[in-house]
Image (tube, rainbow, N blue to C red):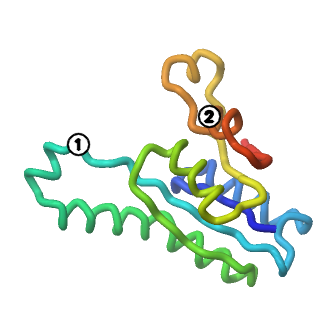
Amino acid sequence: MKILFPADGSPYTKKALAFLMTHENFCRPEDELIVLNVQTPMPPRVKSLVGTSAVNQYHLEEAHRVLDPIEKFIKRHKLQHSLHHVVGAPAPEILKAVTRHGAHMVVMGTHGHGLLGRALMGSVAQRVVTESTVPVLLVR
């Protein structure tokens, strides 16, 4: 089974990863964990001020800040995995990655905002659950 694991570096990501690693039915040797970090795009004004190269370097460094500790953790558990990062809006990029990588399931941490929080700020997890073509497991 291919599991897409969106990772933003938050404590919620760590809890979701710990959940996956402690439940053997999700992380068997034949399974693959596809770790995805989505970086929010810089405003065009910033890109024009500092240059595309500097912005790309920033996104790469931020992705490594999130993905490197996760990779170290996954390697200790000897699980097949791949690491990816993209720049864009989180929910649409996660949904595209499901198709692009042929994922069978999405497992992600959720910040656990209440109804008011989702109404005011929106929720990446809510949108992924609503629009995903594969099962989504939210870990809180």
Q: Residue at x 51, y 68 (%)?
A: 84
Quadrant (top left, top right, bottom left, bottom right) of the N terminus: bottom right
Whether residue 52 is situated above or below residue 76 in the rendered picture: above
Whether residue 123 is situated above or below residue 101 in the rendered picture: above
Which amino acid type is shown beneath numbered disc 2?
A: Arg
Whether residue 30 is situated above or below residue 6 in the rendered picture: below
Q: Between residues 84 and 99, which one lies in front from this camera angle?
A: 99
Q: Residue at x 12, y 60 (%)?
A: 51
SS of the residue at dot 2? helix
Residue at numbered disc 1: 43
Corner quadrant of residue 6 = bottom right
Q: Residue at x 54, y 42 (%)?
A: 91
Q: Position of residue 140 (x, y in %)?
A: 72, 42
Q: Between residues 75 and 60, which one lies in front from this camera angle?
A: 60
Residue at numbered disc 2: 127
- Label 2 and label 1: CA atoms lie apart by 23 Å
Q: Position of residue 89 (x, y in %)?
A: 44, 43
Q: Position of residue 85 (x, y in %)?
A: 47, 64
